[in-house]
Image (cartoon, grey):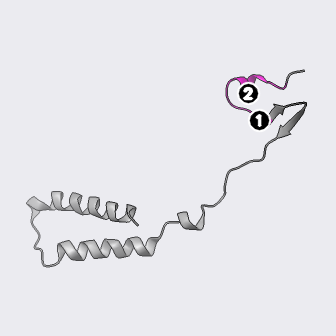
Amino acid sequence: MSMISRSSVTGSSFGIKNIGLYPVKLQNTYKLKPDPSELFKRGSVSYVMQEVLAEFLDGEKYNHAQCRTLSQMLTDLIKTRVKDM
């Protein structure tokens, strides 16, 4: 009797593989939580945002013509600095 089922032929299997004479049952490999190094660091991101905003907006007056381009530039800059962390 072959261990190949219809679902394993299409690409999805139920965790049983036929290696030699005995089937091997595979364990689940999903994680319930992210690794501590992959957690979102809210404090450091907030610091970067405050730093960028203070650097570029200190002493600026509101100008509706520049507001759109300035906000897009600031969000791009914040995003790249956060990604570099």
For label 1, the residue is 14
Q: What x and y, as percent, mark residue 50?
A: 30, 75
Assess disc 2: are there few (<14), some (14-19) or many (≥20) residues with their C-alpha within 10 Å of its C-alpha: some
Q: Quadrant of residue 14?
A: top right
34 sits to left or right of 16:
left
Dot label at residue 25: none
Q: Is residue 8 above or below residue 73?
A: above
Image quarter where the N terminus lies is top right
- Is 65 situated left or right of 39 in this image? left
How many neighbours does mark 1 have within 10 angstroms: few (below 14), some (14-19), or many (20 or more)?
few
Q: Position of residue 62 (x, y in %)?
A: 11, 70
State how far apart marks 2 and 1 are (Cα).
8 Å
Looking at the image, which residue is at 68% across and 24% down? Answer: 10
Which quadrant would the C terminus be assigned to in this image? bottom left
**Residue at (58%, 68%) from the top-left corner?**
36
Q: Nearer the viewer, residue 63 or 59?
A: 59
Q: Is 8 within the magenta?
A: yes
Which residue is at the front of the view, 42 or 81?
Answer: 81
CB under 8 Å between discs 2 and 1: yes
User: Is 44 situated above or below 25?
Assistant: below
For mark 1, give the secondary structure: loop
Q: Chief secondary structure of the magenta span?
A: loop
Question: Which amino acid type corresponds to the residue marked 1 in the rendered image?
Answer: Phe
Q: Residue 79: percent from the left, percent from the top?
A: 33, 61
Residue 21 falls in image quadrant: top right
First in sequence, mark 2 or 1: give its number: 2
Residues shaded magenta = 3-16
**Disc on res. 8:** 2
Residue at point 60%, 61% (across, down): 34
